[in-house]
Image (cartoon, rainbow, N blue to C red):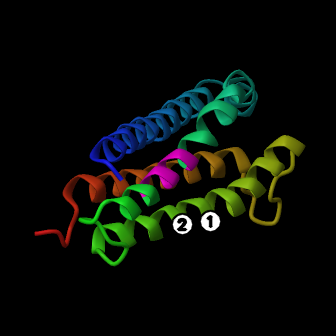
Amino acid sequence: MTPIWYQILLVVHILAGMTWVGGGLVIQITEQKAFRLGGRPAVDRARTDLAWADTWLAIPAPVLVIGTGIAMVVIDTGWRFTQTWIWISIATVGAYQALALTLGARLYRQVESGEEDRARRVDPVRSLIKLGNVLLTLLTGIVFLMVFKPGVN
């Protein structure tokens, strides 16, 4: 494949990564501020206002990042899936997706239904905000790996 295709994939990969991290950061800051200022009802309003972000940012951006990342490794002879920074990045994305799709989905269902974990007296909104912090930390770690590429001489 010609170098131009790699460069196009790289630009899409970087833009999608910026969208994924930036969008997640905006949503997280908005929800935390809403929770501090107005509690659960304010978070519910903020989530309603930001619902478009799930559809237009939170779903397509990770798909584009993962797809273009894999494509770049496949077409560039300099990158291999066995390189430390690549397999750690893939494992971290896997951990992110597993947390988001399991724990995140369960917490979203609890928030939507108005349930609380009465046995542990945990507010699912507060737990969802904490999970968002963990997910953003994982994304920051992935960005670190992409920039510094540990294991590459």
Label annotation for residue 94: 2
Looking at the image, residue 4 sits to the left or right of residue 148; the answer is: right
Residue 9 picture location, percent across and down? 40, 44
Instruction: Give the residue number, with chain letter if any, for mark 1.
Output: 98
Looking at the image, residue 31 sits to the left or right of residue 22; the answer is: right
Q: Secondary structure at mark 1?
A: helix
Q: Residues within 10 Å of mark 1 (few under 14, many from 20)?
A: few
Kindly indicate the quadrant of the structure image that contains residue 51: top right
Residue stretch in magenta: 63-69
Residue 40 picture location, percent across and down? 73, 34
Q: Look at the magenta stretch and give its main secondary structure.
A: helix
Amino acid under disc 2: Gly
Report the residue at 35% width, 67% height from top.
86
Q: For this rendering, which residue is in front, 118 or 91?
A: 91
Report the residue at 82% width, 52% height from top.
116
Residue 127 picture location, percent across and down? 64, 52
**Labels 2 and 1 touching (C-beta < 8 A):** yes
- Identify the residue at the far left of this view: 153
Label annotation for residue 118: none
Q: For this rendering, which residue is in front, 43 or 22?
A: 22
Q: Is residue 45 above or below residue 74?
A: above
Report the residue at 46% width, 48% height from top.
136
Q: Is residue 57 above or below residue 64?
A: above
Amino acid under disc 1: Ala
Q: Secondary structure at mark 2?
A: helix
Residue 24 picture location, percent across and down? 52, 38
